[in-house]
Amino acid sequence: MLTPTVDEIHEADRLFTDLCAWKGTSISRAKYNELRQILQDYTGVDLPCLRRYASRLTDMTNLNARLIDCCINSCVAYTGGYTDLNACPKCGYARWRMRQNGTHQPYQQYMYMPLADRLKYQYTCRQRARILQSYCHPFFDQPRGHAVLTDWWSGRRYRDLRHQGHFQETTDIALQLLLDGVQLVERGNHSSTPVILINYNLPPALRYQKHNIMVSLIIPGPKKYKDVDSFLYPLVEELKQLRTGITAYDAYRRRPFTLRAEAVLVTGDGPAIQEAMGMKTPGNAKAACRSCLIWAKKAPNGHFYVPHRARHLQPGGLPMRSNLRDQIHDAVDSGSAEIMKRLGMYSLLSMT
């Protein structure tokens, strides 16, 4: 089944999608049905019923979320090297509960919204396809020594990537990945972690608007995850596919093309960034700083602390990491747990 372009959607469906967006702001189902009845009684206008709107939107767009099993304590997701496990490797809790009919049911799942289909669908809208290509185009021919920083596209990292063969087409998409834990209740401790994607091909005035922010997945909680890589696994696999390229349709130029996308920036609070990079957080590693190689000492309670010394405060007093990106790649390629420990990284081998 081919996905229709946004411009080909019927007017009745446009009304339906606009009403869904409006209702989703702060309108309850009861209030919407009350408004629907009033308009029907006094004006004869019959607004569409929004019951089961999620399934209707899915039928219209062919965008389907995936439910993936995870530990009931949110330790890990059963992906990658954990796919075939029947119990959590961190806390030991069972993956399944037994139903009365003899079938298995996972104790907990999290929802993942595939990225590739969402990006492809954006290109089926002529106006959106034009914006996605036109904003980044002026940055393509800037010299590598360009010094005026106005956006990620005008920064050195983009120019280096372009020099390495990335972002050769205006249809290539740059993404920011943001993850940060949020507390859901005022009392108690129930934390969840949304993973959000920002489309850098949109101008800054548009990219941070609510309807342009893409929620990729939400790590459910109530406790903090113990292996974030396992939850990010389906997103990483899609990003690997998108880096190579997939076939899509450009409604602006009215032709098929190869769609590529890369996550060029990962942001969040300090611990989230450390974990996304495969590094241990301060307090549980000898070398937990991602900027320098200062070594911590182990306290009697098992935690690591960094002793303050006068020489550390002097210029050049700290041994700086020369190139953390290369260090991470080299450590992963080596497969050596000892090298990872020395660099303050936790083992990444369980997900390979």
Image (cartoon, rainbow, N blue to C red):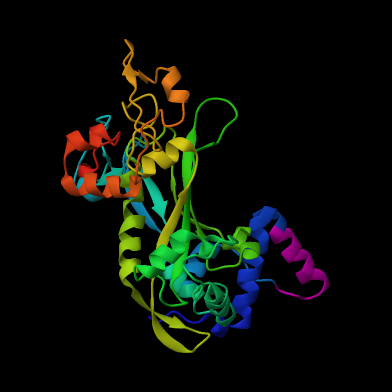
Return the residue found at the far front.
Answer: 315
Quadrant of image for the N terminus:
bottom left
What residue appears at the point 46 percent right and 76 percent down from the top-left corner? 171
Seen from this angle, which residue lies furthest right? 42
| Vertical comparison of 287 with 180: above or below | above
**Magenta residue check for 42:** yes
User: Which of the 4 quarters of the picture holds residue 38?
Assistant: bottom right
**Front-most of 243 and 342?**
342
Q: Is residue 138 above or below residue 240?
A: below
Q: Give the left or right position of residue 293, taking residue 87 as reference.
A: right
Residue displayed at 47% across by 42% down: 193
168, 29: nearer the viewer? 168
Q: In this view, does 216 lie above or below 62?
A: above
* Main SS, magenta residues: helix
Q: In this view, does 212 lie above or below 183?
A: below
Give the image location of residue 190, x and y in percent.
49, 32
| Residue 308 in view (yes/no) | no
Q: What stretch is highlighted in magenta?
A: 32-46
The magenta stretch spans residue 208: no
